[in-house]
Image: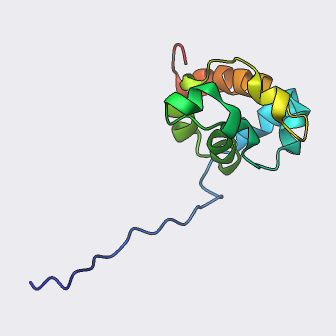
Amino acid sequence: MNKFGFTLSVPRVIDYDKNDRSVADLIAAKEPTFRLCIECGTCAATCTAGNFTDFSLREINVLLRRGENEAAAEKINRCMLCGKCILVCPRGVNTRNVLFIARETLSKTNGHERL
């Protein structure tokens, strides 16, 4: 078989019908400011954990809203809950509470003992 220098890419389509967005709905019910997030990235820019690891609060918010809970559960443990992100959020999202609720919810739904 000849190789021509290219390969077929795996489709990166997000199927919202298959993803479970119940975690994001629960977070929004417990912390209404979660719906105000416009994913501007200000929180990620000031994050201490983000400066030393690949943690990004913006990415976690996107994953939760998409319903990609497994990927969010893997990354959410890197947050130190310092609260810098709350101070800089232009929309007033209580990001610390959002992450706390997300940790709690994902640990119950995914069977993780401690996230």
In which quadrant is the C terminus drawn?
top right
Residue at point 67% right, 19% down? 104
Residue at point 67% right, 47% down? 62
Q: Name the side, left or right, on which 19 lies relative to 21.
A: left
Q: Position of residue 41 (x, y in %)?
A: 72, 45
Q: How many marks?
A: 0
Q: Position of residue 42 (x, y in %)?
A: 75, 42
Q: Position of residue 84 (x, y in %)?
A: 75, 24
Q: Is residue 68 above or below residue 99?
A: below
Residue at point 45% right, 69% down? 11
Q: Is residue 16 above or below residue 93?
A: below
Q: Is residue 33 above or below residue 40?
A: above
Q: Name the side, left or right, on which 12 lies relative to 109.
A: left
Q: Is residue 76 visible?
A: no
In which quadrant is the N terminus drawn?
bottom left
Query: Extreme top residue here?
Result: 114
Quarter assignment of residue 33:
top right
Quarter assignment of residue 4:
bottom left
Residue at point 70% right, 26% down? 99
Rendered image coloring scheme: rainbow
Query: Extreme left residue here?
Result: 1
